[in-house]
């Protein structure tokens, strides 16, 4: 996916484009997850769309729910969605940070091989 260590690092403008692509992938994952949470809260708890959005966004952001579920199906959904949200948060952060971390390590290694 990225350039191997024996090749020169890509130019800055290509790197910025790579960062933007990763940010778009991360944003798409978050939007999909937010929509799934809204549908679940609307269906299983009967929350209005705006309240379903608020609950989903708060869980995805790691803050916790605003409205606690009252039905058994709602409680099951909320628990599963909370675990899913934690994973999405970590995955989205990893997708955004990966190109920068790779470039930093690649530049350090490239400078090391140039001196040898």
Image (cartoon, rainbow, N blue to C red):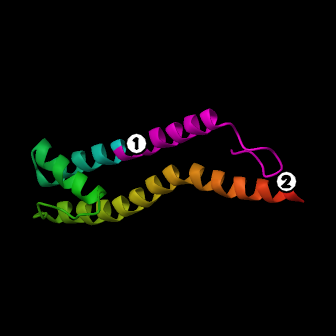
Q: Tell me the distance, in whole angstroms, between the alpha carbons under discs 2 and 1.
A: 37 Å
Q: Earlier in the sequence, mark 2 or mark 1?
A: 1
Direction from residue 25 to residue 106 in the image, left or right: right
Direction from residue 93 to residue 11 in the image, left or right: right
Residue 34 placement (x, y as % from top left) = 29, 47
State which region is magenta: 1-30
Residue lying furthest front: 115
Check if mark 2's residue and mark 1's residue have beta carbons within 8 Å.
Answer: no
Q: In terms of image quadrants, where is residue 82?
A: bottom left
Residue 107 placement (x, y as % from top left) = 71, 53
Please tell me which residue is depicted at 53% across the width and 41% down the height of the picture.
19
Magenta: main secondary structure equals: helix
Please tell me which residue is depicted at 37% across the width and 63% down the height of the picture.
86
Q: Is residue 5 magenta?
A: yes
Secondary structure, mark 2, is helix
Query: Would you name the residue on which mark 1 appears?
Result: 27
Secondary structure, mark 1, is helix
Give above or below for 6 relative to 84.
above
Q: Is residue 8 magenta?
A: yes
Query: Would you name the residue on which mark 2 appears?
Result: 114
Q: Nearer the viewer, residue 31 or 61?
A: 61
Give above or below for 107 relative to 50.
below
Please tell me which residue is depicted at 23% across the width and 63% down the height of the picture.
63
Binning the other alpha carbons within 10 Å of mark 2 as few (below 14), some (14 to 19) or many (20 upward) gives: few
């Amino acid at each position: 996916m990225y350039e191997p260590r024996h090749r020169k690092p890509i130019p800055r403008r290509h790197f910025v484009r790579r960062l933007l692509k990763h940010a778009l992938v991360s944003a798409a994952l978050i939007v999909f997850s937010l929509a799934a949470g809204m549908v679940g809260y609307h269906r299983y708890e009967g929350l209005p769309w705006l309240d379903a959005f608020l609950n989903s966004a708060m869980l995805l952001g790691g803050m916790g729910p605003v409205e606690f579920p009252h039905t058994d199906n709602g409680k099951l959904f909320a628990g599963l969605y909370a675990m899913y949200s934690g994973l999405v948060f970590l995955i989205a952060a990893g997708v955004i940070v990966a190109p920068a971390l790779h470039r930093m390590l690649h530049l350090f290694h490239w400078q090391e091989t140039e001196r040898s």
